[in-house]
Image (spheres, grey):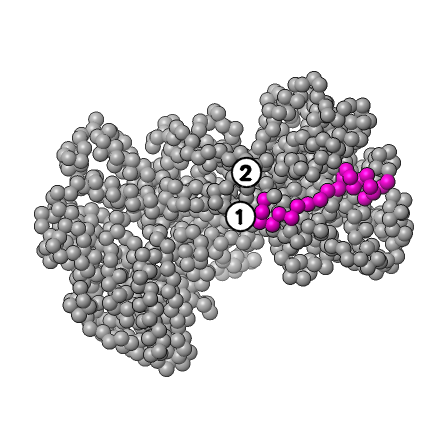
């Protein structure tokens, strides 16, 4: 799809390159932080942490060296929205980074680009060059004395876990991609030990709009707890897959109509680490307070075998666990084995319950978000599709 | 070494550094938390685990180790913190604000049990056919949580082939639970870095460079990884079956030398607390097992002091008087882990390494020459065993150059743990043994040889002799009770200066043919340093390379293991900072109880120069038997 054909109320609304930065440097850092806080903007990567809180902690940290990192390691199965932003709207992402740098006092920014997005590197570098030429980057940006900022592009190497912010920082430092212990959080002890904010591509892309068009305009979209809009990467059984900008609070059924999905049986909201929502719950809304998502929407129609879907997810986690903590490394293997047992019809309900119990332990005892969310699909698919899986095609009833 | 701040861990694994106020009564110095509804005030930055310990609550741990930086990977120590969605690893959570902690909720218990079950599912082997049976941390956890079945199954085939390529360390990765203690030991504590986790997900495993066998990577054989492994995934290469066979063979004359550190620690293997020296009980036990003679390694430690001390004097004489170019500072060479470390990491400094062999190898060479002749035994029939706190000693005795006697000088290096196993196997309860003495012709050695077991001990022993040689004064006149306190303790790097002044003594007879007088040392200041643990050794070596303070030293003691030999890789498990302190205390106490506390006063040492090494210290015969050469290895193995 071409850029000018995209429609959206917030992100895809009109924006002139550099405007956000111009507006920002006229204000004080505190004013911008206040605006972002008032806008109730939350992280678009999926976890939904208030952006202003993150920035405030880095801004308040007493350090000469601070970093803003743009998390472009878009690896959640079924998400491809950051790709659109980076290719078609780099001005939003990079202006957002410059504004963030201004607010928190960072001199260096890094964009951590998914390994598979290597092909974008050249165009992004070219774009950064023009920014430098236009003094949107470099020294004394747009004439603001002492506001110096530069952005480097760093490539990921294909590990899913590196989308987790501390594993991402480890990877940037040249170490194995493994999540760190928290606390300390990156806002105090981040990249190379310095205060660091790691923000999703989409979060940063939202910033210039808020700064130029105001908080009230932004809050007109979405719900009270989930302000603004969201990019959804829609894939699976529908006529019009693609990236859609919709306000938070959109019902799943509305989205399904929009994309031409028919005979839908289930929607996986939030990718492999998200939850699987059955038809009976299609009136639920896409919002932080209801069905939260980093943007991945995968649609399954009635012909799909949900056990097969689940198996696919579990294989993904067995492969992508970084392997450092016990619950995630071995737990996912056990959950996958469980799926295979059901597939063969060789299982007992007591063991399946044991595995669900294990899944709940993994959710609370794993070291990072990967292991904490990997049992979500296992638990939600087995709960929501027990008729199909245990009595229907997915396997026969156990003892 | 004892303080965690010294660890050069990756930033990620460093605990949150909060400056702990020295005066805890100041505002913000402490924080009050509620653990299981009981309030406790702790210094800011205390981990939940430490706070729980303070309030008498035990939390199970596995990946956590007092010597190592935080990992937080096994997740067995999780607790509930009010207001937090997920459980927190108590070992990795520093307390910086008031909080409510619960350590035994249903959620916590279920998580811990599930984690133990998961580990057991992938842990190959059965407890009764495992050498760590009864001493395995995974087994204790399973017992603590009442595991009576394999909930998530149990592997029946080994996942990895065993690596027994190394003379010192055997790796059985099928028993590994990926706590990464060995990785943190190798990378952070020792800064050697031959072990690291590779691959991800269920394929994650601890490996070496290009998955090569341990004998083909630059492992220094220190065995510190073995000492911290919670299971049987790592262990020393155990020669006890061969030793039993030799003992059972009537034609063989089996002798054993015992080093001071195993004697100070072996009691731990028999249920005694740390810090009980078992020297004389061990003599009896070894005889009852069937060793023909029991010798004291301290004898050759004393000999090392003479040889290495005189080597130093000769180097200084050449440098200061004869204006020859010699390598200074001189480095000690007793620690085989350190020797291999320098061969790999600083091969350009091998000339600085004393050519004197380690006490173990000196003894080996003497047993199959001097002793065999004296006792009228064919050296071919002598089997020489060395009880050492060390896994690297196994590699050392297998070095091709260690054949000065015409035979393999030392046949087997045996660790403290393996010795304890042999004693138990013989049905002997060590602490109940009557006391007995060492065998002649070497008898009992001096306290100076004894303290070789503690970091700083070689240097202290050397100075006790050098001071008397050069100044003609009693060491006691300068250092109270001949205890050289600045060289004691567990600081990673120790440094000391000894001004010689204007009054020097006369040259003792034993070295009169080497140096005419001491006048050339008048006004000089002897500078010495001590490092233990190869990470600290690295600090000194890098300083020397950069031409810093340590490059002006004359003599530096290096020990590969934290705490010196008493913290060696062959010592009883666990070895912790507290246990190292207690072992050191036992060694120093034994030293003080001895009448002879200086190497040069050991009558057997005097005798051997009179009877056997007749051309004196550093003479032709001593060079043949007691000195060696080293291999420039660099990043290569051979």
Question: Residue A19's spot in the image, x, y percent?
Answer: 27, 77
Question: Residue A28's spot in the image, x, y percent?
Answer: 34, 76
Q: Residue at x 74, y 54 (%)?
A: B327
- Which numbered mark, 1 or 2, is in the foreground of this view? 1
- Look at the image and tell me whether residue B279 can be seen: no
Question: Residue A113's spot in the image, x, y percent?
Answer: 34, 60
Residue position for label 2: B226
Q: Nearer the viewer, residue B435 or B152?
A: B152
Do badges 1 and 2 share one subunit? yes
Chain holding disc 1: B
Q: Nearer the viewer, residue A220 or A191?
A: A191
Quarter in which the C terminus of chain B is drawn: top right
Q: Nearer the viewer, residue B168 or B9?
A: B168
In this image, B319 relative to B80: left or right?
right
* Residue at the bottom extreme, as displayed: A143
Q: Is residue A23 above or below residue B222?
A: below
Asked which secondary structure carries label 1, the reply is loop
Q: Earlier in the sequence, mark 1 or mark 2?
A: 1
Asked which secondary structure carries label 2, the reply is helix
What secondary structure predominates along the stretch shown in magenta? loop
Residue position for label 1: B193
Verify whether residue A339 appears in magenta. no
Q: Residue at x 53, y 40 (%)?
A: B214
In this image, B192 relative to B146: left or right?
right
* Residue at the top extreme, as displayed: B250
Which region of the structure is painted magenta? B615-637
Q: Is residue A364 above or below residue A70?
A: above
Whole-number angstrom distance, CA of label 1 to CA of label 2: 15 Å
Q: Nearer the viewer, residue A349 or A302?
A: A302
Chain holding disc 2: B
Q: Residue at x 70, y 17 (%)?
A: B250
Q: Residue at x 31, y 71 (%)?
A: A127
């Amino acid at each position: 799809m071409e850029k000018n054909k995209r429609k959206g109320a917030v992100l895809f609304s009109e924006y002139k390159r550099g405007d956000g930065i111009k507006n920002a440097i006229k204000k004080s850092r505190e004013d911008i932080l206040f605006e972002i806080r008032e806008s109730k903007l939350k992280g678009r990567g999926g976890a939904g942490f208030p952006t202003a809180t993150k920035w405030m902690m880095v801004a308040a940290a007493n350090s000469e060296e601070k970093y803003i990192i743009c998390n472009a390691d878009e690896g959640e199965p079924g998400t491809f929205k950051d790709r659109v932003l980076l290719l078609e709207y780099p001005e939003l992402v990079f202006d957002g980074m410059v504004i963030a740098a201004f607010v928190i006092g960072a001199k260096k920014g890094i964009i951590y680009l998914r390994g598979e997005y290597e092909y974008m590197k050249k165009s992004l570098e070219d774009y950064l060059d023009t920014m430098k030429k236009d003094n949107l980057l470099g020294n004394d940006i747009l004439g603001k004395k002492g506001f110096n900022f530069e952005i480097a592009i760093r490539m990921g190497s294909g590990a899913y876990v590196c989308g987790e912010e501390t594993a991402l920082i480890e990877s940037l430092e040249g170490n194995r991609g493994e999540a760190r212990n928290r606390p300390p959080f990156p806002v105090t002890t981040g990249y190379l030990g310095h205060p660091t904010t790691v923000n999703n591509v989409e979060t940063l892309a939202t910033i210039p709009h808020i700064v130029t068009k105001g908080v009230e305009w932004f809050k007109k979209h979405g719900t009270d707890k989930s302000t603004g809009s969201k990019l959804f990467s829609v894939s699976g059984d529908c006529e019009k897959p693609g990236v859609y900008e919709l306000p938070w609070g959109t019902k799943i059924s509305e989205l399904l109509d929009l994309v031409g999905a028919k005979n839908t049986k289930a929607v996986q909201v939030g990718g492999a680490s998200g939850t699987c929502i059955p038809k009976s719950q299609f009136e639920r809304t896409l919002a932080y307070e209801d069905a939260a998502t980093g943007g991945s929407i995968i649609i399954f129609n009635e012909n799909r075998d949900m056990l097969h879907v689940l198996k696919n997810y579990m294989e993904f986690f067995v492969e992508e666990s970084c392997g450092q903590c016990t619950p995630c490394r071995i737990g996912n293997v056990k959950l996958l084995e469980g799926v295979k047992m059901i597939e063969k019809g060789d299982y007992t309900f007591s063991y399946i319950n044991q595995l669900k119990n294990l899944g709940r332990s993994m959710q609370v005892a794993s070291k990072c978000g990967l292991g904490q969310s990997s049992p979500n699909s296992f638990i939600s698919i087995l709960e929501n599709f027990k008729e199909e899986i245990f009595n229907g095609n997915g396997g026969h009833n156990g003892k | 070494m004892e303080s965690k701040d010294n660890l050069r861990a990756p930033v990620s694994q460093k605990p949150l550094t909060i400056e702990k106020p020295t005066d805890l009564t100041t505002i913000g110095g402490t924080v009050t938390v509620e653990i299981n509804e009981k309030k406790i005030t702790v210094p800011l930055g205390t981990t939940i685990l430490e706070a729980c310990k303070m309030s008498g609550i035990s939390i199970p741990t596995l990946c956590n180790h007092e010597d190592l930086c935080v990992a937080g990977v096994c997740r067995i120590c999780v607790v509930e913190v009010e207001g937090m969605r997920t459980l927190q690893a108590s070992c990795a959570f520093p307390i910086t604000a008031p909080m409510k902690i619960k350590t035994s909720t249903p959620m916590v218990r279920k998580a811990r049990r599930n984690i133990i079950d998961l580990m057991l599912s992938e842990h190959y082997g059965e407890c009764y056919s495992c050498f760590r049976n009864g001493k395995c941390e995974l087994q204790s956890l399973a017992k603590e949580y009442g595991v009576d079945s394999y909930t998530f199954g149990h592997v029946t085939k080994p996942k990895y082939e065993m690596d027994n390529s190394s003379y010192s360390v055997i790796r059985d990765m099928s028993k590994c639970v990926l706590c990464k203690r060995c990785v943190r030991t190798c990378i952070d504590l020792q800064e050697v870095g031959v072990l690291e986790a590779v691959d991800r997900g269920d394929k994650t495993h601890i490996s070496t460079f290009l998955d090569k066998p341990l004998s083909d990577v630059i492992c220094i054989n220190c065995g510190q990884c073995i000492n911290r492994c919670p299971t049987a995934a790592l262990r020393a290469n155990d020669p006890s079956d061969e030793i039993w066979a030799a003992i059972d063979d009537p034609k063989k004359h089996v002798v054993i030398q015992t080093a001071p550190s195993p004697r100070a620690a072996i009691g731990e293997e028999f249920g005694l607390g740390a810090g009980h020296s078992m020297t004389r009980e061990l003599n009896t036990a070894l005889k009852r097992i069937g060793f023909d003679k029991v010798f004291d390694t301290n004898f050759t430690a004393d000999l090392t002091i003479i040889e290495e001390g005189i080597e130093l004097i000769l180097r200084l004489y050449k440098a200061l008087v004869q204006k020859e170019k010699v390598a200074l500072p001189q480095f000690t060479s007793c620690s085989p882990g350190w020797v291999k470390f320098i061969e790999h990491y600083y091969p350009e400094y091998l000339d600085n390494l004393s050519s004197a062999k380690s006490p173990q190898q000196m003894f080996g060479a003497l047993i199959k020459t001097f002793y065999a002749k004296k006792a009228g035994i064919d050296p071919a029939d002598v089997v020489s065993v060395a009880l050492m706190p060390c896994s690297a000693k196994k590699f050392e005795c297998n070095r091709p150059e260690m054949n000065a006697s015409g035979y393999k000088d030392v046949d087997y290096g045996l660790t403290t743990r393996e010795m304890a196993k042999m004693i138990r196997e013989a049905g002997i309860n060590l602490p109940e043994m009557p006391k007995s003495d060492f065998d002649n012709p070497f008898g009992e050695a001096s306290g100076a040889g004894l303290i070789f077991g503690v970091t700083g001990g070689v240097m202290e022993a050397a100075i006790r002799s050098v001071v008397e040689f050069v100044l003609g004064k009693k060491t006691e006149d300068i250092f109270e009770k001949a205890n050289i306190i600045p060289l004691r303790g567990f600081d990673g790097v120790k440094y000391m200066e000894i001004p010689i002044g204007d009054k020097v003594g006369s040259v003792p007879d034993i070295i009169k043919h080497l140096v005419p007088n001491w006048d050339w040392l008048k006004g000089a200041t002897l500078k010495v340093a001590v490092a233990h643990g190869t990470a600290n050794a690295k600090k000194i070596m890098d300083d020397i390379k950069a031409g810093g303070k340590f490059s002006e030293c004359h003599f530096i003691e290096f020990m590969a293991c934290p705490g010196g030999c008493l913290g060696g890789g062959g010592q009883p498990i666990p070895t912790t900072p507290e246990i190292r302190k207690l072992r050191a205390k036992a060694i120093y106490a034994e030293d003080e109880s001895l009448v002879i506390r200086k190497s040069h006063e050991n009558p057997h040492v005097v005798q051997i120069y009179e009877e056997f090494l007749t051309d004196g210290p550093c003479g032709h015969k001593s060079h043949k038997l007691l000195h060696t050469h080293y291999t420039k290895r660099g990043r290569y193995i051979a």
